Amino acid sequence: MRRRTFCKSALAAGIAATLPACSKDSTATASSTLAAVSRTGEDITIESSLVKDFAASLQGKLMQSTDGGYDSARRLWNGMFDKRPALVAQCTSEVDVMSAVNFAREQDLLLAVKCGGHSLPGKSSCNGGLMIDLAKMHSVDVDTEAMTAKAGGGALLGHIDVATHAHKLGTTTGIVSHTGAGGFTLGGGYGRTDRLTGLAVDNLVAANIVSASGEILRASEAENPDLYWAIRGGGGNFGVATEFVYKLHPFNPTIYGGNVLFALSTDFLTGYGELAAELPNEASIEPNIFSDPDGNRMVNIEVVYAGDHATGEKVMAPLLKLAKPISEQLGAMEYQTFQTGADAILGHGKQYYLKSGLVTEISAGLAEVIVDHMNRDAPVGSWFQHLGGMPASVAPDAMAYSHRNAALNLGIMIVSEDPSVMDTQIAKAREFYKDASPHIIGFYTNLNEESDQKTQGNYGDNYPRLVAAKDKYDPGNLFHLNANIKPSA
């Protein structure tokens, strides 16, 4: 076991001479105390001298609401949430993260961790607590000999794609490039190539985790294997991830793919489900179901074939026979076109609500539910992520992520720039999800906010082992703004 601990007083003395002025000049000295919120939600005050000492311990910047950069740092992707932390620690190193975790623990302060800020329920920030902002820790280093990529805890998926594809290598990343790698990975990590290269957690070789005790722990098969098991699907329950090491695979950044548009019908959906189950691992076909401006219900199939282009054309031929395409655009294309194509549509500041449901097939009953709700609820969109393939070959207890028998992930989503319509539309999305629930075996943690009972049930037989890891690494539940694994005590 490798542990690195630091004496805070020695650390502060050792780096004081090189601290940036912004850290020392925080408005923490403006009053004798700082109003804040405790870990359990009570109003508390913190002596300004303690805040000043905390700021001095950072190589990065500590911000309050009146400081420049505060509003930018606290901004979240989902515009439904406008949270105002008492403090934002913009960390630039693992040592900074250690100082921030220690401060939050010692002051019993509510703590949130932000990488890309894409937490759908807004848990990347908090009101009145401390937000650890990892955005400055975004470096990605590729080792072509070891076939690995080392990414900082604040790296975005786009950072990883750009760095790895330059060497014709790749690992599984998600569908929006400005998503943070941290939350994406720790929750499982679905992407357009996961059928071929595995989920993000399947490719996670090692990680550095700052635990609730303020220690930097290496999590790998050789070091702290129980922590390594738990973080691969257990989310941010066990500490702050400051470094990830991913396994890389040979990857041609020019793939065969594109989009094919069809009219929505139950027969088309069931036919799609059957085809998706038969395709080789190189193939991913993912439907986006929506209403066009004229009110017609459409299915756009996004096609990715990460292999020989001629073979891909043959493999995808049956898709064009499921129904008569309204339009078809298939051929050689840059993979990054897909990876960044939704960045603006799913941009920062819009209102988002999403429910996820894992299914083993598209039965006639599920297809009928989808068509029914899409026909009556035009603003509600839905889609499927194409699973199976390599991830299905991993045992459900090999790591915390357990849903290895899922064939598809059904998403039910609201996207709006008008906050006034969200309550009505969320109610429709929830009704849609309720009607689909008899066909659902679980959910993708990254895309849901659920009750404690549902979170426990979603991990199934893996949950007791997760609780044991929580008891060991975060017995006080400092890290609870997540799909929370509650400690047993």
Image (cartoon, rainbow, N blue to C red):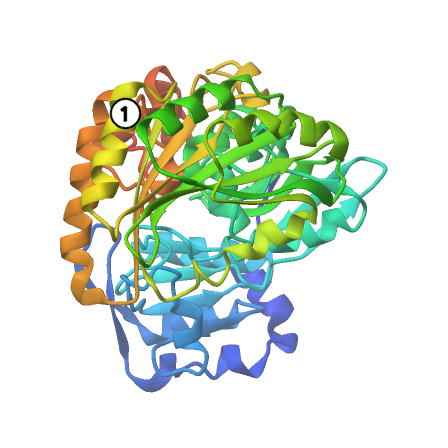
Q: State left or right for residue 285 relative to residue 282.
A: left
Residue 110: % across, % down: 30, 55
Between 13 and 436, the residue placed more toward the observer is: 436
Q: Which quarter of the image is occupied by the N terminus?
A: top right
Tell me the residue at 18%/41% (across/down): 430
Placement of the C terminus among the 4 image quadrants: top left
Report crowding for label 1: few under 14, some 14 to 19, many 20 or more residues within 10 A (C-alpha): many
Please indicate whether residue 128 sits to the left or right of residue 14 in the image: left
- Residue 77 or 11: which is nearer the viewer? 77
Q: Depth check: 397 or 218 in front?
A: 397
Question: Residue 51 in the image: x percent, y percent?
Answer: 38, 71
Quarter of the figure with residue 318:
top right
Taking the image as shown, residue 8 lies to the left or right of residue 474, namely right
Q: Residue furthest right?
A: 145
Residue at the outermost front position? 324
Quadrant of the rendered image containing residue 73: bottom left
Answer above or below: position of 410 versus 42.
Answer: above
Q: Which residue is mark 1?
A: 366
Q: Amino acid at mark 1?
A: Leu
Instruction: Identify the residue shown where x is 30% and y is 66%.
Output: 417
Picture coordinates of residue 107 (x, y %)? 32, 58
Q: Is residue 185 above or below residue 405?
A: below
Residue 240 in view in this figure: no
Image location (x, y in percent) of residue 143: 80, 43
